[in-house]
Amino acid sequence: MRFFRIFLLMSLLSVSLSATAALSANEAQARRIFDKTYSMVFGPQGCMLSYNVNIIGLYKTTGTIWYKGKKQKFIEKRYASWCDGHSFYRVDTKKRTIELHDPNSPNRDKYASKFAFHADNYTYHVKGRKQYYEITLDAKDGVSGYIKHVKALIDGRTYAPVSLKIKVAFFWTTIKISNLRSGGIDDSMFSFPRQQFAGYEFIDKRAE
């Protein structure tokens, strides 16, 4: 479970945008809202957000994540990672280890490929509320993958994501999102601060 929750969040949000066709008015509206929220998180301006993950009450964690292009960073109580687009550093503060990975390698985390998410593999529906939009995503017939259903709650005024409820295989995971800041993300924060982890074991896994 150690990196399951962050890659679940990243895989869900990291969708590829493409043109939609032959959609109902409701589906088209739902996709437009979803894409607008996506651009706030994954646009070239970068973003920061805090998350609170609850996997059917059995596993809980909180943290903060930053994105900007291929760069990313997240901080939790035990785990953290930095990726400057060229190197991916993963820190375990309990084991006092630092792993160095190729950022493009699927081996940097075994859960990443299992929870890939592609926006066009789902149908969309929106419920309009005074304060929030509720976007429901259902996997189309024949689509393989672990994520089958998603309910995304989006702020009706700012379009910021509020929460995600995701059905992965046979269980539901809830992710609450807060403190979204879109833009103003300096590239320097993605540089790994190795001096903060003096005495940690360094493990180079780039050849794996």
Image (cartoon, rainbow, N blue to C red):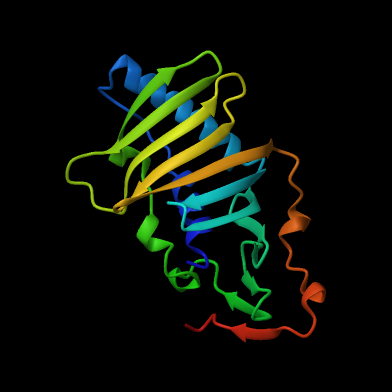
- Residue 199 coordinates in the image, percent (x, y): 77, 85
Q: Is residue 9 found left or right of 20 in the rendered image?
A: right
> Which picture quadrant has residue 110?
bottom left
The correct choice, above or below, for 176 with respect to 170 in the image is: above
Using the image as rendered, state which of residue 141 and residue 95 is in the foreground: 95
Q: Is residue 43 visible?
A: no
Q: Is residue 22 shown left or right of residue 205?
A: left
The foreground one among 170 and 125 is 170
At 63% across and 56% down in the image, what residue appears?
A: 71
Would you place residue 114 above or below residue 109 in this image?
above
68 vs 162, nearest the viewer:
162
Q: Residue at x 68, y 86 (%)?
A: 201
Q: Position of residue 66 (x, y in %)?
A: 66, 50
Looking at the image, how many numbered discs can be counted on the residues? Answer: 0
Whether residue 12 can be seen here = yes
Location of residue 180 with respect to 59 vertically, above or below: above
Residue at left offset 54%, top offset 56%:
60
Name the quadrant containing residue 94: bottom right
Please indicate whether residue 117 sits to the left or right of residue 93 in the image: left
Q: Nearer the viewer, residue 194 or 95?
A: 95
Seen as rendered, the residue at the extreme front is 57
- Name the spot of residue 161 as percent of width and height, x first: 55, 34
Residue drawn where x is 23% and y is 39% of the image = 140
Image quadrant of residue 41? top right
Seen in the picture, residue 131 relative to 47 is either above or below; the reply is above
Q: Position of residue 191 (x, y in %)?
A: 74, 64
